[in-house]
Structures are given as C-alpha cells and as structure tokens.
Amino acid sequence: MIKNFLKSIKLKNCIICTLGGIILAFGMYNIHSVADVTEGGTLGLILLLEHHFAISPAVSEIVLNIICYSIGFRTLGAVFLVYSAVSTSAFSIAYAVFECFPRIFPGISEHPLAASVAGAVFVGLGVGLAVRTGGAPCGDDALAMSISRISKIKIQWVYFISDITVLLLSLSYIPFGKIVYSLLSVVISGQIIGFIKDFTITRRRG
C-alpha cells in the first residue's frame, strides 16, 4: 500500500510545486508586503499578522496552512497533502531567503495599480502551478479546492468570496482607497489560478 502511494507521487509535480512556491514568495516579499496591496485568504492574513504583530510570513504561513490542511484532508487526500507540503515548504524557505536581501522594487508602493497587477500575476502563477498539479502552497487553497469539489462551484469564485472577507479585515491597516487596488489584485490572481488549473492543450488528430 505504501509502495503504491509513493508511486503516485510524481517528481515532475514536486518540481512544479516547488517552482510555484518560490514564485509566490518572490511576489509576496517584493511587491505585496511593500506596496500595502494585500491578498485574500491566508496570504492576506499573513500580511495582516506581519503588520500588526511583526510575525514573519515564513512562520505564520506554515501554522495557518497546517490548520487548513487538517480541515481539508478528508476531501483532498494524502497525495494532495504531499504536494502541498512541498509547495508550502518551498514558499517558507524561499521567503526566509528573500528576507536576507533588500527588496527589488522598494519604490513600487508609489505605483499601487502596477503593484496590484504585478502582484496578482506572481500570486496567480505561483498558486496556479501548484493547484494544477493537485497541491497548494496555501491553506486557503486547500479549502477552496475542497469547497469547489464538493459544491461544483468554479474555484475562482470560491476564492473571490474568501478574499473579500479578508480584504474587509485588512481595512484595519490599509486605507480604504488602497483596498480598491487589493480587490483588483485578488480578482486577477483568482482568475489566473482558475485559468491555469483548467487550461488544456487540444491535440490535433491527423
């Protein structure tokens, strides 16, 4: 049984999950945490915790993910948790490494529109790659995939509802005017995640 389980874990998917986690960490550290443009779900929560309590996302991300993965385990299965563990570890390690260096875009806070779009691309691509392989770098992705599977609602709309909730909480430290840019960011990132997850290449039969 264990042998069959190990065979179901593909190295290619582990590499993709690792890449997704690194891309996500890069965007979160160099854009979102600088520009006061937040994200929804656990991504928004870890930024909120960092702002109010100075808790590093490298730590809070793991704690929140363990809670969410425990809730979604029954629906998502053991293979999902393996890929998610790979992606989450990649995120936390990469974020901790990035924290050792100056941010690449220190002045991006002066351009909130550019920050919201660029941040959304990094989040959408990073999370989307992991979700496509059957894993997720964030706990809310586990919950979103579980809810989507049970309710048959497209995953991007599950993200949208949870993201709006976190954005309302983020009003505690982000001015209302900037929340508009955060809303744009979560809408774009959610759609990118959904696109990458559902993207298929049609092969011609000749």
Image: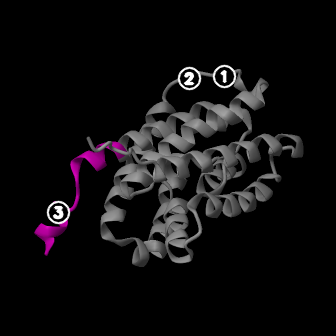
How packed mark 3 is, by other alpha carbons closer than 10 Å (few <14, some 14-19, many 20 or more), is few
Residue to which mark 1 is pinned = 106
In the structure shown, which secondary structural element does the residue marked by tag 3 occupy? helix
Q: Picture coordinates of residue 166 (x, y %)?
A: 72, 58
Any part of residue 88 in sight: no
Q: In which quarter of the image is the C terminus?
A: top left
Q: Is mark 1 on a helix, strand or loop?
A: loop
Q: Which of 112 and 151 is in front in this view?
A: 151
Provide the residue designation for mark 3.
6
Q: Residue furthest front?
A: 206
- Tell me the residue at 33%/44% (across/down): 203
Amino acid tagged 3: Leu
In whole angstroms, how far apart are the C-alphas of marks 3 and 2? 40 Å
Relative to 34, 98 lies left or right: left
Magenta span: predominant SS is helix
Discs 2, 1 touching: Cβ within 8 Å: yes
Q: Does the magenta stretch include residue 10?
A: yes
42 with respect to 95 (left or right):
right
Q: Cβ–Cβ below 8 Å for labels 3 and 1?
A: no
Residue that appears at 49% across and 72% down: 149
Q: Give the range drawn in magenta.
A: 1-16
Foreground: disc 3 or disc 2: 3
Secondary structure found at label 2: loop
Residue with the mark numbered 2: 102
Q: Position of residue 83 (x, y in %)?
A: 34, 56
Q: Quadrant of the N terminus?
A: bottom left
Picture coordinates of residue 185, whole percent (x, y) = 69, 42
Q: Looking at the picture, does residue 85 appear above or below residue 118?
A: below
